Structures are given as C-alpha cells and as structure tokens.
Image (cartoon, grey):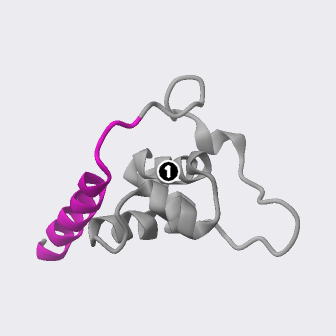
Amino acid sequence: MALAIRRDQLIFDGEVTDQAELARLGHVTRARLTQIMNLLCLAPDLQEQILFLPVTERGRDAVAAQASKGYGSGGKPSSCKKPLCFSVASRIASSMLTRSS
C-alpha cells in the first residue's frame, strides 16, 4: 500500500512520466505495477487497515478472510477508472479537511 502511494506521488509530482517508466525503474512488469497501483482503488478505510497491519516476524502474513468481505463483488476488486492524480488530490483534500476541523 505504501509503495502504491509513493509511486502515485512520483507520477503526480512529475518525477516520472507514467506507470511504464515506474515499472522499468522498479524492474517489474507493467502488469505487476498495475496490481500494486490498483490498491489505490480500495476504500480509504481499507487502505488504512493495510498500512497499519502488524509486522510479520516470519512466514506469511496472517490476514483473516473476513478482512476482504464487502470488497467488490465476490471478494474481487472492482475496476478503478479514476486517474492517479485524483487519488492523490483526494487524499490531500481529505487531510486538509481533517486538520481544519
């Protein structure tokens, strides 16, 4: 999740031109980068839960199946069509509203 947020910010700030460039720089396929960036399509409360998962000392992360309930239809993500810069702008606006309250 943190990786997706950081990569989104790099595009927003103009440090890289697009996801294809990010994939090349990160030595991953464009498909893998798309999977990572699609985490930004999750509801903000789910993003927060992912960011604050406890550290796994060894083995696989123990994430309960219930954590994905209500996530799209049949536990699968819905297709997110919003531009990446919109996701950054909405997070900035949200944090500004929270601070002013």
Question: Residue placed farthest to the top in the image?
Answer: 74
* Residue that numbered label 1 is attached to: 39
Local secondary structure at mark 1: helix
Look at 24% across and 53% down and name the residue there: 86
User: What percent of the width, then of the height, locates residue 11?
Assistant: 34, 65
Q: 51 or 24: which is nearer to us?
A: 24
Magenta extent: 80-100
Question: Residue at coordinates 34% horizontally, 74% vertically from top-left?
Answer: 15
Task: Find residue 96 and report its horizontal and vertical position in percent.
Answer: 16, 71
| Quarter of image, res 80 | top left
Classify 70 as above or below 55: above
Image check: 58 left or right of 71? right
Residue 81 magenta: yes
Front position in the image: 101 or 36:
36
Q: Residue furthest left?
A: 100
User: Considering the image in quadrants, where does the C terminus appear?
Assistant: bottom left
Q: Residue at x 28, y 47 (%)?
A: 83
Q: Is residue 81 above or below residue 99?
A: above
> Residue at coordinates 51% horizontally, 33% vertically from top-left?
70
Q: Quadrant of residue 24?
A: bottom right
* Residue type, label 1: Leu
